[in-house]
Image (cartoon, rainbow, N blue to C red):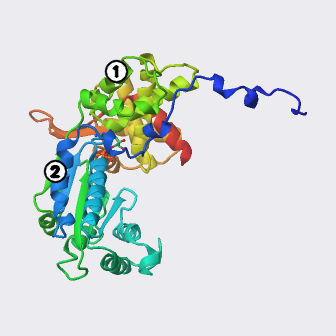
Amino acid sequence: MSYEDEYDPLFDDPQDEKPQIFARRELVEIGHVPSEKRIVGRENEIQSVGQYLRPVVNDDAPSSFIIYGKTGTGKSLVSRHVAMRARASGERRGNRIGVVYIDCSQDSTETQAACSIARGLNEESSTGIAVPRTGLGRSHYYARLWDILDQRFDAVIIILDEIDRLKADDGEDNILMQLSRAREAGKTSVNIGIIGISNKINYRDRLNERVKSSFGDDELVFNPYDANQLRQIMEARRDAFVDGVIEEGVISKAAALAAREHGDARKAIRILRNAGEFAERNGYSTVREEHLDAAQKRAEVDRLQELLSGLTPHTKYALMGLATLTANNPEDEFRTSVIYDAYRSVCADAGSETLTLYRVRDLLREQSFLEIIESYHTGGGRGGGSYTVHQLLKEPEIVFECVDTGAEDE
Ligand SMILES: Nc1ncnc2c1ncn2[C@@H]1O[C@H](COP(=O)(O)OP(=O)(O)OP(=O)(O)O)[C@@H](O)[C@H]1O
């Protein structure tokens, strides 16, 4: 069959007759780091981080500190932004400042993190030092890192995002100790400032005393954005869309939706982008308020998928069990033993063996860190004993959608 002379609507339909929704889509892409003029509502936090980094610029010993705050509150953004400004300012004074950003959920072992820091700060053509991605032992990565620092910089700022995901391999001798004590221990003459970032407010309690003392008592807390701030953040990205495409009221409603949960800017931007994509796909010439519900649901699914990625199949089965229970009794909380029964039926459907009740209880507890479920201990009343109950924080339908998708990938 020949298509040569025929008009093929698949490819020949004039695209430009479709309404254009996006002008600069990249402004609402996930992972896009906005420029300074688009950073809204974090002036005080920028000032505070700037205070901590000031010594680095002046070639003094910097303080290391931790930033806490819920997801999407601008912790990474503000840290990177201020670190880059510190670097530029240092350079104007003749101080060479290195900045490296590490996502500890990706580089969670000490060796991986040390390797990534060394690679991030290296420039092999000027140092002559090779830092292979794999193949070296931990101490060799450190040795190369100290050499790179001494050759290239007067000071460095190391941003450790999701610092709570770092595995402390052998107790005290972990990467935070190494970095925070490197100068004092004579391994390098370069000042090292560490910005640790965490969503978990109790993270500090898990640090050992010596690391704690290196971090001092210094911590900043970033509060969730309110609807007004979220609206401004989205307004500052309006030029992602063709002029006039966003209907009146859309940004305010999207801000209200995102603020209702926990003031997450990432989610707000996602909702806006999804609404634009929805309009685009369905041939609308404008983005309308009624597109926001679908957009929000998509944002929820995306977020849960991110949270679920990397979880073991059994954690997913346990969540499925809890979601099934919740679908029948919304807003209810369930004892571990009840969830365990539901989990067993999920395993049976999936043709999988089951883990023990205790193991499943542990899996559920671990999840309570991840904003998917909430677990707490409760007294059973007089003579009732105490037990743990768990509540799903997401809509069960969203869990069904995500877990199904996840299971196909395995
Ligand atoms: N104040 C802000 N102004 C403009 N955009 C913002 C602001 N805060 C956050 N954003 C947007 O939200 C995205 C997520 O922010 P960021 O990565 O800084 O959050 P976070 O607090 O580090 O969250 P997580 O803990 O999930 O990494 C940013 O890439 C940016 O697009």
* Left or right, residue 14 beside residue 228: right
Q: Is residue 399 visible?
A: no
Q: Earlier in the sequence, mark 1 or mark 2?
A: 2
Quadrant (top left/top right/bottom left/bottom right) for the N terminus: top right
Q: Quadrant of ligand 1?
A: top left
Q: Residue at x 43, y 77 (%)?
A: 126
In this view, the residue in front, 299 or 75, is 75
Q: For mark 2, what is the residue?
A: 48
Which structural element holds mark 2? helix
Residue 346 position, x and y percent, is 46, 38
Indicate yes or no: mark 1 CB to ligand 1 under 8 Å. no
Residues at circles 1 and 2 in contact by the CB criterion of under 8 Å: no
Residue 267 position, x and y percent, is 36, 35
Q: Mark 1: give few (<14), some (14-19) or many (20+) Cα within 10 Å.
A: some
In this view, the residue in front, 60 or 363, is 60
Q: For mark 1, what is the residue?
A: 253
Q: CA distance from mark 1 to mark 2?
A: 31 Å
Residue 362 position, x and y percent, is 30, 49
* Left or right, residue 102 beside residue 290: left
- Amino acid carrying label 2: it is Ser
Q: Is residue 329 above or below residue 119?
A: above
